[in-house]
Image (spheres, rainbow, N blue to C red):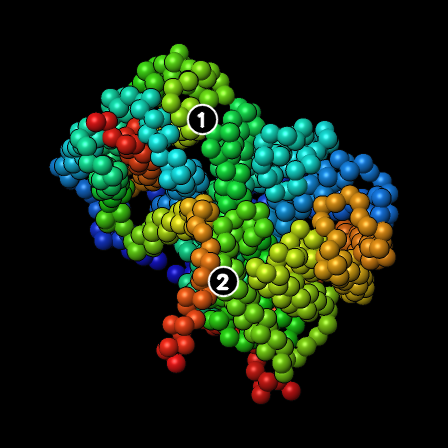
Amino acid sequence: MSTAIAEIHETPAESSVNYLNVTYGIKSWLLTLDHKRIGLLYLGSITLMFFVGGMAAVLMRLHLVEPQGALFEPETYNKMFSTHGIIMVFFFLVPSIPATLGNFLIPLMIGARDVAFPRLNLMSWYLYITGAAFALFATLSGGVDTGWTFYPPYSSTYSQTHVVIVALGVFIAGFSSILTGVNFIVTIHKMRAPGMTWFRLPLFIWAMYATSLIFVLGTPVIAITLFLLGMERILHVGIFDPAVGGDPLLFQHLFWFYSHPAVYIMILPGMGVISELITAFSRKKIFGYAFVAFSSLSIAVISFIVWGHHMFVTGQSIYAGLVFSVLSFLVAIPSAVKVFNWTATLYKGSISYEAPMLYALGFIGLFTIGGLTGLFLAALATDVHLNGTYFIVAHFHYVMVGGAVMAYMGGLHFWWPKITGRLYPDLWARIAAAIIFIGFNLTFFPQFVLGYLGMPRRYAIYPAEFQVLNVMSSAGASILGIGYIIPLIYFMWSMRYGPPAGPNPWGAKGLEWTTQSPPLTENFETIPIVTEDAYNYPSEAAHG
Amino acid sequence: MSDHTEQSGHTGHIVPVSTYLLVFLELMVGTALTTWIAYIDLGRWNTVVALTIAVIKMVLVVLFFMHVKYATGLTRVVILAGFFWLGIMITLSCSDELTRTWEIVPQGWNMILPIVFRLF
Amino acid sequence: MAELATHGAHPQGFAHQFEDIEQQRDAGRLGMWVFLVTEILFFGGMFTSYTIYRALHLESFIQGSHQLEVKFGATNTAVLIFSSLTMALAIRAAQTGKKKGQIIFWLVLTMLLGALFVGLKLRFEWYRDYVDGIIPGVHWFYNGPHAPGVKMFMCFYFFMTGLHAIHMIVGLGILAVLVSMTARNKFSSEYYSPLEISGLYWHFVDIVWIFLFPLLYLIGGRY
């Protein structure tokens, strides 16, 4: 197909074979073993869950424009925030970067043809959508009102909502994570191309490896915890039941043993993406590669010894509180190391401001704010005042949305040309990034103030003096929502009408950029031999 | 790529039947011993003995039946990590659950400060 | 080295995302060990809870433990240890290139022992527990000393041995698949990874029971 007319609408990359067009039909997608297609299967399902969880958030913020609540009965509001949390945490944030970008990129970045266990990879996706189906079914049948944290005795004894079904959905999705973690660990250990030593790996791979450690070590514990909760709810007796000598706080220990590291599952891949974006758009190698690599591992390890900071005011002993408070300060250190190193990478770099870079810069600022406010919460004394308020809500949204989601958006924008072979309109992408940044801050900054002033979280009503800040937050939420819808539109547009991308539109370093866009099913015609370090951009001396 | 030699990984190593039988015997003896000792009053030591024997049995199964004696360092690190993480979960949970009734020492600072001052 | 080896060089069972069978074997083994670590943490949640409550309610746990019969726990321990031996011998038979009949013999013996374990449990322990009314939430009319704490202990007993039994039954299913694969000549002394990896799983389930026996049946001794 090389007529002049064909060349206007088609490109050599498109008329050539790639993983998208090599076979057609629904069976070729639902039974695929190609890690790239599986990444796209996840992308579709995760995007759906994001908008479902986002819908719950929009409804919550609309409700909260009035001090007495504008839309719902309190019981319904409780279901709204629970649904929002459950869907966003378990069905969006935890799998987001690992299952989409991780699945797509890991074999490409290490020079392999696929992950170690492709069939297990496909099974992971099916487990994910089975779990999501249970959760959606429960939501549509009335949801749960326990919060995403499911604390007993409310969740085990008193709540009249579909706790067991939702817990089952999360349980099943947990196995999706576990198998993904196993797959990634084995892939990274055993399938690197010749010459791809550990210290030549892109930092995204180090981040994904650290994330996979958390998947493997933490997720089984929430699985057993939800199993025990389900048993207690079904049998009306169990190990968290004070009537038989049980302790509801034991649930919290087991729950947070996973759920705290889980928040690092959410941020570590994002940090890996940021390392890739900062180096590419400063055209400079990362400052302190080994420090950034080891900081990912340190975060993964330390994340497991801090969970009690979620329990400072729920009845934990003061001694445990002291221990967990000190340990929680420790975990900030490797995160700070990363922020310093990214900033040092920017210094004297050749910086350009395409959309992925805007997201990366936004991440650095917003993650820093979110991370610092975490320190206020790690200190026992200030946590007593701030716990249970909107300060916490603002803190975790700064790290999870201002951090992880922005990194996810930045990564999608950076690798979209590789994934689809198409370019999206950069002007609209930058506009959307700006709208998201503005909307995000307008939504969540007022919540720091609200929390400090004492407005409790998870409440359907609030004192009238907080209304102005709440209205500001809700206004911001609507702007943020628009900001997320715009990329949906131009990404879909680009798949049909976007100009062809070519193998390396950004001029970035990394094995994935040496392949065609979109790549072949087998990734590389011949497995590369790696001879250079990561981010081997020409130095400033060689540069003009 | 690595050569397929007798030393590569574990595949080359074949454990003799006699080793398996010996380990089997040791495991059975350990079980019998554990059961027998349960009927003897050793007070708190009953638990210690029983769990020690259980750990020894586990080590035998891991080293010989699961071939870890002939496995790579990575395998050992993976196994140790698993137990270490279990240890974190138990230890830090107990640091709360078993200290709930500890009294906050009322004279705490008053006791410590004079000692500190004497140091300087 | 940068080229893929040609088809003819690869033994049966080779998966093409790998460079060679050695890499595939290593990957399979590492994958199963990582999975077993997840199982350590999975059961570990229950062992953690057990540790805490035993420390806080020792008298109740002793009383609860005395509701169990040591002879069945000990017998089942022996059964499982024996099954680990037969599993190891099955893998060894494949490793040393024995005929498939011999491999199948050891696999079937392992299955029978595993089924014996489950059967003994169901018939002599859980059925009797039902009759005696010491199954919390299902059939409970114990009114001996420390009744609430004994109920808690029995929750642990059923949850832990129940989860263990589910893992055993899954193991039996895996063994059945392995018997079928062996019968269909899928294995050789060059390629027996599924047997080896399943063996790791089976031994792990044995190890869990090695700990459950003293922790559930022998609390406080029987003197």
Q: Is residue A102 above or below residue C114?
A: below
Give the image quarter of residue C4.
Answer: bottom left
Whole-angstrom CA distance, mark 2 to mark 1, is 37 Å
Which residue does the image show at 66% across and 41% down from the upper left?
A: A147
Which residue does the image show at 40% across and 26% down from the upper left?
A: C146
Task: Give left or right: position of A40 versus C145.
Answer: right
Which residue does the image show at 38% across and 72% down from the upper left?
A: B115
Q: Is residue A118 above or below residue A437?
A: above
Pointer 1 local density, CA inside 10 Å: few below 14, some 14–19, many at least 20: some
Foreground tag (2 vs 1): 1
Which residue does the image show at 31% across and 24% down from the upper left?
A: C66
Type of residue at label 1?
Pro
**Which quarter shows the C terminus of chain C?**
top left
Give the image quarter of residue C36.
Answer: top left
- Residue to which mark 1 is pinned: C148
- Residue to which mark 2 is pinned: A326
Q: Nearer the viewer, residue A139 or C8?
A: A139
Residue A10 shows in the view: no
Which secondary structure, mark 1?
Answer: helix
**Which quarter shows the N terminus of chain C?**
bottom left
Which secondary structure, mark 2?
Answer: helix
Q: Nearer the viewer, residue C62 or B92?
A: C62
Chain under disc 1: C
Q: Position of residue A391 (x, y in %)?
A: 69, 57
